[in-house]
Amino acid sequence: MATTLHLGFIDYSILVTYFALVLGVGFALRRSTKSSTDFFLSGRSIPAWVAGLAFLSANMGAQELIGMAASGAKYGIATSHFYWIGAIPAMVFIGVFMMPFYYGSKARSVPEYLRMRFDEKTRGFNAITFATMTVFSSGISMYAMGLLLGVLLGWDFHVSVLVSAAIVMLYIFLGGLTSAIYNEVMQFFLIVAGFIPLVFLGLRDVGGWAGLSARLATTATKAGFAPGAYTHSWKYMGHAASNPMGVEWFGLVMGLGFVLSFGYWTTDFLVVQRAMAADSMSAARRTPLIAAFPKMLFPFLVILPGMIAIALTTQAGSGFALPAKPDGTLNYDMTVPMMLGHYFPSGLLGLGLTALLASFMSGMAGNVTAFNTVWTYDIYQAYLKKDASDQHLLWMGRMATVFGIALSVATAYLTTQFNNIMDMLQLVFAFVNAPLFATFLLGMFWRRTTGHAAFFGLLSGTLAAAIHHGLTLPRGSVAGIKGGWLGGPLHVYPSEMAQNFWTAIWAWSVCFGVTIIVSLVTRPRPDDELRGLVYSLTERPNTAGDAWYLRPGPLAGVLLSMTLVLNVIFF
Amino acid sequence: MNLDIRIPIGMLFTILGVLLTGYGVVADHNIYQRSLGYNVNLSWGLVLLAFGIVMLLLGRRRPGSDVPR
């Protein structure tokens, strides 16, 4: 695939400016990083809007930009479900209902909250799986970055991986979480600055939304769908066979909207850590709500380019086509880079690539800061050195940053050798994550929930996910990494996505059921020990005196109404 | 925190704005065939420059700013 873009002097100048500023922030923050709380929680001093944008950016790694544009090309506007039915309701929920415990309990991490609410073994289970997962996912995204830059710019894989890893390591080592957060906020603005011109030019080219719809109607009929299948998000969700996603509305709403999205946005320490760093309870609760406003508009920045790309690809003579993979299918992951190369002249091209690189780096930084915190507080201090002084923990955090990055780089290289092992690991982590939200929901809202119940609920939910995956297959796949490895298959899903959603639904339901049953037969903790940890025993933060735009309730109302309107417009 | 985040953001976008605007003025107009004939470097560069300057001004005003400590 010879799609190498040519960068000029101006493009490199832009890239170098960004790197210099990123490192400059790290050095500037070094002096104010004096205690472990400074390093791991930014001294709980981050203003709401900064925490909010970082909350959003930490999640906006490569998966978001590359992946969501790829999905836009593959599934059309239905990709917006990941935002308008998935992320936004979950972000509203964590801000309104969960932050009072997370922030109020003064837990320093999600696993630590689990220890306070349940017991040591539940914390240990979560801490170890989470720490492993962050290292692997940052390694896998490093690998993806090295590969992409190689294809795109002809850059050497080793140079791409090692240089970006070194930069991220340096700025986190120096300034800890604050450094990561500051850079995430810069990255947010960079991505917006890089993508607005892309959407503008793309839409101009295809004749606006009307022109795009007309072109996508041809794309849809060619693929055997109704003409509006790429431009309506709900209309064709009645049956899995009538939309390109291959999912029906129930699996979508329950699997993606409820289990997966709530599970990710409310329990993943990678994002929760940003809210825990906020400077007050009020700011912590507003963090996810502030993040939700730009999140709601991101489909226009990342999904539209994908839709434009597929419309141009299926139209003969448009002068643009997505490249094909060796097996003949389109390489959707090349959507963003190809579109940048197609519309951006030298200069703006440098900005677009810098935005892309920034997203890779901040995704990595999000993983590394979550890893060093969980490692230091929930593994090292909890099990290895209980009497560690604060200065020792700060030192350990810096060391964890170094070896966390080193392990990620090792993972990236391992992935070049054994692609399947990484796929398998990601699968295992998906099993571990799927039931987690059931544990949190019960733990926070039903004070009867016990530690034994949480642990065995999680374990059986994970097992249920594995069994479900092992007994089902997406259509057209062979037994193995895609499922069906336990024999069968008992059920064939119309698409891989449908299988994922239902795996999550099964895991959640089993965890929910088992946790309730075990809770009823084990001894609950006395109410006194649960104050500030469960809903019914926690004082609601008093917000009556604040202006409406500082109160979570009214903000949540505005967010949900706007999301509803967007769903209706693109119905 | 000693460092107001608006300062590095302002610096980044001011520099990027200057680079893009400058390049938009001097570069051969043929490169804009890709961008449908628009001189996007010049116009978008000016937008980024304005954003950068606003951020620098907001970050510079220490008293009354919302950054604690």
Image: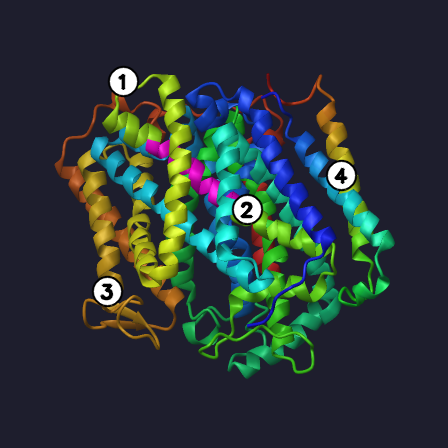
Same chain letter for marks 2 and 3: yes
Q: Secondary structure at mark 3?
A: helix
**A512 with respect to A231 (left or right):** left
Residue beneath disc 3: A470
Chain identifier of the residue bearing label 3 in the image = A
Callout 2, which amino acid? Leu
Query: Compared to A416, does A15 lie above or below?
Result: above
Magenta extent: A361-375
Q: Dot 1: within a 10 Å radius of its alpha carbon, few (fewer than 14), some, or many (20 or more) residues?
A: few
State how the image is colored. Answer: rainbow
Residue beneath disc 1: A387
Q: CA distance from mark 4 to mark 2?
A: 36 Å
Quarter of image, res A205: bottom right
Callout 1, which amino acid? Asp
Is A470 in front, or is A130?
A: A130
Sequence-wise, the earlier of marks 1 and 3 is 1
Quarter of image, res A2: bottom right
Q: CA distance from mark 1 to mark 3?
A: 44 Å
- Residue A73 in the image: x percent, y percent? 56, 68
Q: Is residue A218 something one can see in this rendering?
A: yes
Q: Main secondary structure of the magenta part?
A: helix
Q: CA distance from mark 1 to mark 4?
A: 48 Å
Residue beneath disc 2: A560
Sequence-wise, the earlier of marks 2 and 3 is 3
What residue sits 26% from the left and 69% below the top?
Answer: A480
